[in-house]
Image (spheres, coloured by chain):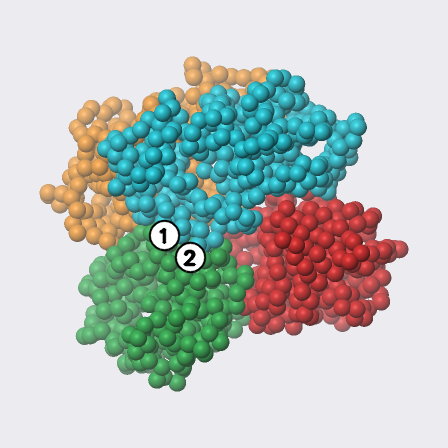
Chain colours: A orange, B cyan, C red, D green
Amino acid sequence: MKKRYETVVVGGGIIGASIAYHLAKAGIKTAVFESGEIGQKATRAAAGMLGAHAECDKPGTFFEFARASQKAYQRLEAELKQISGIDIRRRDGGILKLAFSESDRERLMQMAVLDSAEWLTPGEVYEKEPYAAKGILGANFIQDDVHVEPVSVCMAFAKGAKLSGADIFEYTPVTSIETGPGAVTVKTASGEAEAEHAVIASGVWSGVFFKQLGLNKRFYPVKGECLSVWNEGIPLNRTLYHDHCYIVPRHSGKLVVGATMKPGDWNEQPELGGIEAVIKKAKTMLPEIEKMKIDKCWAGLRPETEDGNPYIGRHPENGRILFAAGHFRNGILLAPATGAMITDMILGRPVKKTWEEAFQAERKEAVNR
Amino acid sequence: MKKRYETVVVGGGIIGASIAYHLAKAGIKTAVFESGEIGQKATRAAAGMLGAHAECDKPGTFFEFARASQKAYQRLEAELKQISGIDIRRRDGGILKLAFSESDRERLMQMAVLDSAEWLTPGEVYEKEPYAAKGILGANFIQDDVHVEPVSVCMAFAKGAKLSGADIFEYTPVTSIETGPGAVTVKTASGEAEAEHAVIASGVWSGVFFKQLGLNKRFYPVKGECLSVWNEGIPLNRTLYHDHCYIVPRHSGKLVVGATMKPGDWNEQPELGGIEAVIKKAKTMLPEIEKMKIDKCWAGLRPETEDGNPYIGRHPENGRILFAAGHFRNGILLAPATGAMITDMILGRPVKKTWEEAFQAERKEAVNR
Amino acid sequence: MKKRYETVVVGGGIIGASIAYHLAKAGIKTAVFESGEIGQKATRAAAGMLGAHAECDKPGTFFEFARASQKAYQRLEAELKQISGIDIRRRDGGILKLAFSESDRERLMQMAVLDSAEWLTPGEVYEKEPYAAKGILGANFIQDDVHVEPVSVCMAFAKGAKLSGADIFEYTPVTSIETGPGAVTVKTASGEAEAEHAVIASGVWSGVFFKQLGLNKRFYPVKGECLSVWNEGIPLNRTLYHDHCYIVPRHSGKLVVGATMKPGDWNEQPELGGIEAVIKKAKTMLPEIEKMKIDKCWAGLRPETEDGNPYIGRHPENGRILFAAGHFRNGILLAPATGAMITDMILGRPVKKTWEEAFQAERKEAVNR
Amino acid sequence: MKKRYETVVVGGGIIGASIAYHLAKAGIKTAVFESGEIGQKATRAAAGMLGAHAECDKPGTFFEFARASQKAYQRLEAELKQISGIDIRRRDGGILKLAFSESDRERLMQMAVLDSAEWLTPGEVYEKEPYAAKGILGANFIQDDVHVEPVSVCMAFAKGAKLSGADIFEYTPVTSIETGPGAVTVKTASGEAEAEHAVIASGVWSGVFFKQLGLNKRFYPVKGECLSVWNEGIPLNRTLYHDHCYIVPRHSGKLVVGATMKPGDWNEQPELGGIEAVIKKAKTMLPEIEKMKIDKCWAGLRPETEDGNPYIGRHPENGRILFAAGHFRNGILLAPATGAMITDMILGRPVKKTWEEAFQAERKEAVNR
């Protein structure tokens, strides 16, 4: 079987699923090749914070791109529910970036200048979240940094793409991507597919394809270990955040807590020591969490790049190849904007110059974050 | 420790949790005693259809009560999310009661006279749900028979009650309820509680307390076996229903399918033969389901009474004792109205005469369904 | 349905199942009434150490009873496999009771006088278990303190009983035990059973029946939280033990680690703080465990009595009633001897005087442990 | 990091793990590269029958190889327990190949001539297994066709290899195997390894490497769906087998039931229709199974080759490359003999000529089965 598509997407995580969704809706005949199941790797492991502010220490191009993506979720919530029947469980409430020290406070103040951020005194914090740990020096409150359920978003994108005509091939690892004059060929154990364009969206596993295609960029895993508990007794309406750790109150009644940062570890299972570290950290933000029932433990690999920013763009020497990978801690947040940007590129629509430059493979320097 | 409450509720399923929620919100000092965990018995097993029409063959008192409860969910959805942070995942779309035979059609027509029901020709059915099985003779479409996630509702009620001051005791089976002149005493392995009123809301396990208190009414289990699958590929927006079986499209992307009817079976585990029967039945309504990935299998006990209707009311000879049990297939649907009705009785507010008569223990005849 | 048996056993944990097994094998028509599923409460939570020495600080009656039970497992392993087809996964290797301090050493030395125990120097310990934590002062090595899989033992007892003619009623909580001149009657929601004898074997939940029957003894839960990890890389052949915590190497390749001690907590779910404590403790005995993959977390209730010893015997004023409950940390270890002793009592066979006195309800003082 | 080994094994299923175990024990510095976790693909899905006779209709080379492997398990059981601490749960009892029709009977009679097989009349069958379905015409009883727990075997091999000095890399998919004059290089996302020899042991996913290395042989998946139930009540000591389906009584008290045959399906998840088929089939062999509690459902991919036999041998033109893949339904059975044979080849020890010819890539015709 040699199948023919306009675009093939390599990777069925939230980035690949978003790209397929945007392409299929635009009428492009699309296929997704996923080695396992849709959304079951880094996507599943994510907490789902749309932390445009949470992940940035100051404004800039990255922040602007993140904000655009964050806003797209407002529209997508209803759209995906209508098309796919799946609710992505977007929950507002926002995030409290807690300051436990003077240096925390100074750093957080840099973002507090934005209209979308608000500096709260300790008293104001405890009024909003009376169970936050004692002793904080204030918090940056960002109403817009809401959260979603990553697997639901990914499944909604994939099903939406399918119902618009895309093919989704699960359990179909791509073994090579080859380009010729007339088409790009994607090879798998169960057959090949040809297409006008191929998009590499394989998270931290994208490096192999980059190398095959002469893109000299590397990806590094940063493993994160997480857990969830049942919050049956206390009010908690906002995500608590400190030092890259978070406690996210889900609409299901669970709190999702994460995450460790283990660079270079490719193993996707949570280790006992990592879980201990997460518990310890969670208690510093929310002491009551110690009494809650444990639900699950898990881990996932954040795809890190050399400068910390994703590669989103087109192969400099081969117009058939595009890429969208390396979103590090921000895959869920950036999925809508990434899907839209890749679709615009394939369709020849205009793309914002600053974004194109910031995320191209051959960029000179790191984007300001 | 002898604790003192205004009301104690015996049973932490959706009925008990709803009662506690309504009481606590009204300022009544309430405690719930649950033998295991909140909502983990019959509540967990339910599909969550708010099938006011689905469960009735003709209008009458029961239908009227069911409709009131169904409507209450509209308000509760936002209220519970706001108070407890938990989303009950109410999903509209309605239900299609399919007719596969002439006798199906005739029976379904009895309800189609209602404003809230609409008779659809086969062509109209397939336009709405193109994957419904071939060969149907039409369907009764009820827009208002939506569904919710039962465990989420129950946890939201319980947490809402708690945040309004109620105590929830999990893993605390009540071993006896004793009434004296000044109070009713509820005994457990870990201590006793006294209260002005006790409400028996223990589902099919209520019979023991009824007997202890001189109420000569029995409860019978009707076991139901269910399963869920992942619907990744086809549109299905409405519940399909035939012959007490259903396929419910959840907002998570799963389809919930059930259920067998096994009277007299107290075992809460699904048997292989029951699961086979559910699969077979599901295929008659939705042939494509055969290709879907299986997610889970489970079972639960519907609490059946002598005449098929719940007992909701006050002990005829002992004003301290109330009961709300025996909701059979309709526990999720009737939980809001039941909670409100019991609360009204305890507070001495007026209760609709027809409802009181229909659900009292000493009723003469079965309510017309 | 009123059923008639020679003996009814109230409780289907490992104690009740052992009693039923021994009775049924002796030709006694027996029934077990279990509120949930066989072996799914305290039995499931146990690590399965047969720690006759581990649990005793000095020789005495308790130790002697424990040793008899421990030895019975040798025979039962083959017998249960033959009768029920279930392998109880008895694993030898023994236990190392580690001394981390001088006071540890002194206490452990008291047991080292026994022939079955052997004092090891640090060098000898590391030769046996090179991954044991640095800095220990020696260990008491007890070859005979092996372990089994508790749920497998319990299921094997229950199935063995069934295949010898016993009836096992799951999901059948007993609500009262009543004695009359001709029989004892056991009542449940689904009917009653009459018998010559009833045996209370309901673990920490036995208190209710004791009270009903005029036995003025109480039971207290001591909750224990546990976890398991996959040991894929290091040799560990012996249980490590210190300060009531243990790391048990199972034949499945998992290590079972436990347990916290939370007196008075009836909730059977593990809390986050408890799991953190278990991890911390495990690292003090086996630092490498920090790198292992977490498998599961769980909790269970040890049934504690006033003096720490189980009640095994006959009601002083009512010959029809027997009891076997309150085994605290030693339910798995003592199940065979308890089952045999109760069976001997019911059959009128001689029972060791010291054991009878040590475990009777009306004993004067605590058994020496 | 460029690592250097004597042999690298590509694939950490039971075949790769057995090879690594045999090599490491022989003192060869070995590494295993596994894309996910050890033994979690086809190995996990297998029932674990050592069906040397079950899988053959007549004697021949394949049968002889299978018998040798089956016998090796007797020794391995104790050896692996001793070295790795893991019990592979080998269970004897044998298999009953049931005849439901005259043609069944004739076919089965072909094997009954062997000393290791015994033809039983219906009466003899029911004496051994009274719950076997009524109406059978006899059965071929093979005492030696015992079974093991596949994941335990695989983990024991892997841990045994590790404790003998091998490195096991989980979550490390090999992306290419390249051969040069001095070494073979195995590339992965996390780095490269060089070795004297590489062994391809990637089951149905081996085709990609075969192609890369100029071996023109293909692999096809034949998906099998399975389930397990708890047998709490009836005696069943022998595997029941008919028409490539089986009911295997495990030492845990579960029955494992399988499996469907779906050629060409690469998806590793069980579908609802497949599970229905398995239930239906199981009932024809053991009607009582319908009342048993369902435990789990799963699926796996059998690696099928063009002629149905595995490729075990050396690349005809490249002495550094060996392969051991395509074991179809017989991976568990053949793992020991395969591991030993590959090790012999690498060490230059003599290998049985008939086996070498039967399993080499360039064989002329199918092995007689």
- Please name the residue shown 47% across and 31% down the image: B369
Give the answer, above or below, for where C165 lies relative to B227: below
Depth check: B65 or D309 in front? B65
Depth check: C94 or D167 in front? C94
Q: Which mark is residue D270?
A: 1
Going by the image, does C160 lie left or right of D324?
right
Give the answer, above or below, for where B79 lies relative to C173: above
Are the residues tagged 1 and 2 within 8 Å (C-beta)? yes
Circle 1 SS class? loop
Give the answer, above or below, for where C32 lies relative to B296: below
The residue that label 2 is drawn on is D227
Label 1: how many Cα within 10 Å (few below 14, some 14–19, many 20+): many
**Whole-percent x, y for residue C176 in the image:** 72, 48
Of the residues shown, which amino acid type is indicated by label 1? Pro
Pointer 2 chain: D
Pointer 1 chain: D
Depth check: B212 or C364 in front? B212
